[in-house]
Image: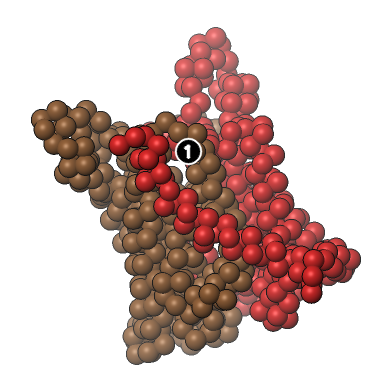
């Protein structure tokens, strides 16, 4: 290795450590035996997990996040998959417009979506409802779905679908029986990102749910502000485990889609199609 | 089916959804910002003549500039190494970059609270090493906000830079080497200039995202480090002044959109997300 290269590698290792250190800290503290926050923890225990599992409030928060996330994912998938087909396969001027709309929803600060949604939803009686919240979450979850399905469709060999049509399948049957199963992993990855995006929405949830029912993000937010013991760290570790599982699933699925379509893209290149959250 | 009808069928639902649940709420908010028992600019006047609000806007701008510069400085070497490594090393590095990316902002900010606090790891290390006699006030300052925000936004910067660097034609670098350019000269004269569109894109995305940050400055910042999103939340949920909160939001929205529009005039915005269509 050239010296310049060695310096580069060392520098990058330091920067990656900076990126990963907070994750390590939260993991370690969640297993702490102390009632105060200290890293490294003075001893190990599972008491904070036991406390979480015994708390109705935390369990309800978890259940609410699952509900809202599931509805958001369903809406995003139903809307996003057809849109991705349209974006990839049609030659339209409206495409640029739709792209702009999706990008705007992604770039607009969360607080603006939260305030706007509240002012719009409150008179309609859509506040404090799981479906209402999911409708608002879908706006920011949709781009993740569209981006991932668009990518899978671009890698899909159209000749396979044409072959089915040539052999007598109707275009819709060909899409349903041939195309959709092949791009299914791409749809699933998009769905996972959509779910995670919903689970992490804080401000929209605060504005639309009030303080009566709290999704996990809101419950954690309140916990962090009083930050007295490592319960939050245990809850966070739950979130980390969820994210890692989702990430591992996405990775396996992507390998499958690559094999199925001979599409030469690795997981990281696909995951990189997940632009920022605000 | 005629292509037009098909287009409506496929793209219509998303467009309508975004119109109803995104554009309309924003429109209602804009309307609310001009509302004071009739059409009026009074909220905007209050906004721009109250010292506190103006200083919050300035703080937001300064912090975002600091964060963007930091992300670029730390992100470029990582992206460069990613773009020039073999496939195996590249995959490992990308996983390491992406793992924290999908971790909740709350969790990551919380972790910095633990590390930077009065008796946090950083302060204890400084005391043990004899650098300082007593804990430094690191947490609840501009610096803790910046450190936390850079950590949160860095994956976004790295990925944007990296995908732009992947589009650089490797043949040009080989040509430079073949004509006798040293590695550093070929980086300076060929690779770096070609990576500039990616640099601009990454700066734009990082800057616009940091303008709207709420969680990190609220947890890691002091009173003086309040950013514009916190101001909007305070004015709306504590002061219950929905019109003023709307006016502040409109300012944030207009600034964010202006940056994106200006960028789009010079560089195609489609490239940002891989030109997905």
User: Helix, strand, or loop for circle 1?
Assistant: helix
Quick check: B181 left or right of A161?
Answer: right
Vertical placement of residue A201 versus A51, above or below: above
At a point 28% along the width and 56% down the height, the residue shown is A249
In the displayed image of the protein, which residue is found farthest to the top? Answer: B179
Vertical placement of residue B14 versus A26, above or below: above
> Which image quarter: residue B102?
bottom left
Q: Is residue A252 visible?
A: yes
At a point 58% along the width and 72% down the height, the residue shown is A118
Residue B191 horizontal/vertical position (percent)? 57, 25
Q: Residues within 10 Å of mark 1 (few under 14, many from 20)?
A: some
Q: Which residue is mark 1?
A: A95
Q: Is residue B100 visible?
A: no
Instruction: Give chain B's shade.
Output: red
- Chain for disc number 1: A
Residue A139 horizontal/vertical position (percent)? 48, 58
At a point 59% along the width and 26% down the height, the residue shown is B194
Quick check: A190 left or right of A133?
Answer: left
Vertical placement of residue B250 versus A165, above or below: below
> Which image quarter: residue A272?
top left
Quadrant including the C terminus of chain A: bottom right
């Amino acid at each position: 290795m050239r010296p310049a290269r060695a310096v580069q590698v060392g520098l990058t290792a330091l920067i990656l450590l900076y990126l990963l250190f907070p994750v390590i800290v939260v993991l370690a503290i969640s297993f702490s035996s102390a009632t105060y926050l200290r890293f490294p923890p003075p001893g190990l225990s599972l008491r904070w997990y036991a406390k979480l599992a015994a708390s109705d409030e935390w369990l309800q928060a978890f259940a609410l996040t699952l509900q809202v996330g599931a509805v958001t994912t369903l809406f995003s998938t139903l809307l996003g998959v057809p849109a991705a087909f349209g974006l990839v396969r049609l030659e339209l001027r409206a495409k640029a417009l739709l792209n702009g709309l999706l990008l705007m929803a992604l770039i607009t600060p969360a607080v603006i979506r939260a305030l706007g949604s509240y002012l719009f939803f409150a008179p309609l009686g859509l506040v404090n409802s799981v479906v209402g919240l999911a409708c608002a979450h879908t706006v920011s979850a949709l781009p993740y779905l569209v981006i991932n399905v668009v990518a899978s469709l671009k890698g899909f060999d159209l000749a396979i679908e044409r072959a089915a049509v040539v052999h007598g399948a109707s275009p819709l049957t060909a899409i349903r029986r041939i195309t959709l199963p092949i791009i299914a992993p791409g749809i699933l990855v998009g769905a996972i990102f959509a779910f995670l995006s919903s689970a992490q929405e804080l401000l929209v949830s605060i504005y639309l749910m009030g303080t009566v029912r709290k999704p996990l993000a809101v419950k954690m937010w309140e916990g962090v502000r009083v930050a007295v013991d490592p319960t939050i760290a245990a809850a966070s570790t739950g979130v980390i485990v969820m994210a890692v599982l989702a990430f591992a699933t996405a990775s396996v699925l992507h390998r499958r889609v690559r094999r199925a379509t001979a599409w030469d893209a690795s997981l990281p290149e696909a995951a990189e199609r997940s632009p920022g959250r605000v | 089916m005629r292509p037009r009808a098909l287009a409506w069928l496929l793209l219509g639902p998303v467009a309508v959804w975004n119109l109803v649940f995104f554009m309309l709420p924003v429109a209602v908010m804009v309307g609310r910002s001009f509302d004071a028992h009739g059409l009026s600019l009074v909220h905007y006047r209050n906004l721009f003549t109250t010292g506190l609000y103006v200083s919050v806007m300035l703080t937001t701008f300064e912090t975002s500039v600091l964060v963007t510069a930091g992300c670029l400085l730390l992100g470029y070497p990582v992206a460069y190494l990613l773009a020039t490594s073999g496939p195996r090393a590249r995959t490992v590095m990308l996983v390491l970059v992406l793992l924290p990316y999908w971790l909740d902002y709350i969790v990551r900010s919380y972790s910095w609270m633990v590390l930077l606090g009065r008796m946090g790891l950083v302060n204890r290390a400084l005391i043990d090493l004899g650098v300082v006699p007593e804990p430094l006030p690191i947490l609840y300052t501009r610096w803790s906000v910046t450190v936390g925000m850079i950590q949160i936004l860095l994956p976004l910067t790295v990925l944007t830079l990296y995908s732009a660097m992947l589009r650089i034609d490797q043949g040009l670098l080989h040509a430079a080497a073949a004509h006798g350019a040293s590695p550093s000269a070929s980086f300076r004269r060929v690779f770096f200039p070609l990576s500039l569109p990616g640099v601009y894109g990454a700066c734009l995305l990082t800057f616009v995202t940091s303008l709207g940050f709420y969680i990190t400055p609220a947890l890691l910042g002091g009173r003086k480090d309040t950013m514009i999103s916190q101001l909007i939340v305070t004015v709306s949920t504590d002061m219950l002044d929905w019109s003023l909160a709307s006016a502040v939001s409109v300012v944030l929205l207009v600034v964010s959109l202006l940056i994106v529009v200006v960028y789009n005039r010079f560089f195609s915005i489609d490239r940002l997300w891989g030109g997905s269509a």
